[in-house]
Image (tube, rainbow, N blue to C red):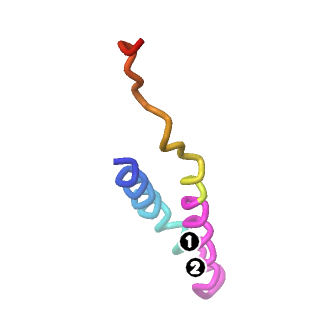
Amino acid sequence: TVFAVNNGMASGAMILMSPIIGKIADAYQGWTEVLLLVAGIFIACALTWLMINAERELFPDENIA
């Protein structure tokens, strides 16, 4: 579920970034800067996985003594 949410958020962000990516490609007359930007976004997304603690319970059972 967490992986699906992360992918959904990344897809939505890239849809919103489409106009910005087009302006960058036009401004620099090429795709190198766009590819670097997208690579940076994906690296930042990958680094966020380091903050996930899979051992922590999200909903601890309060009835266990």
Viewer-closest of 28 and 49: 49
User: Would residue 59 appear left or right of 43 to someone viewing this image?
Assistant: left
Amino acid beneath label 2: Leu
Predominant secondary structure in magenta?
Answer: helix
Q: Nearer the viewer, residue 42 or 38?
A: 42
Q: Is residue 20 magenta?
A: no
> Residue at image x 60%, y 60%?
44
Q: Residue at 45% across / 59% down in the picture?
A: 10
- Residue 28 position within the rendered picture, expressed as x and y whole percent measured from the top left: 66, 82
Q: What residue span does the magenta drawing correspond to?
A: 23-46
Rendered-image quadrant of the C terminus = top left
Marks 1/2 in contact by CB < 8 Å: the verdict is yes
Q: Which residue lies under the disc numbered 2?
A: 35
Residue 38 is labelled as: 1
Q: Is residue 60 above or below residue 45?
A: above
Count of numbered labels shown in the rendering: 2
Which residue does the image show at 56% across and 71% down from the upper left?
38
Q: Quadrant of residue 20?
A: bottom right
Callout 1, which amino acid? Val
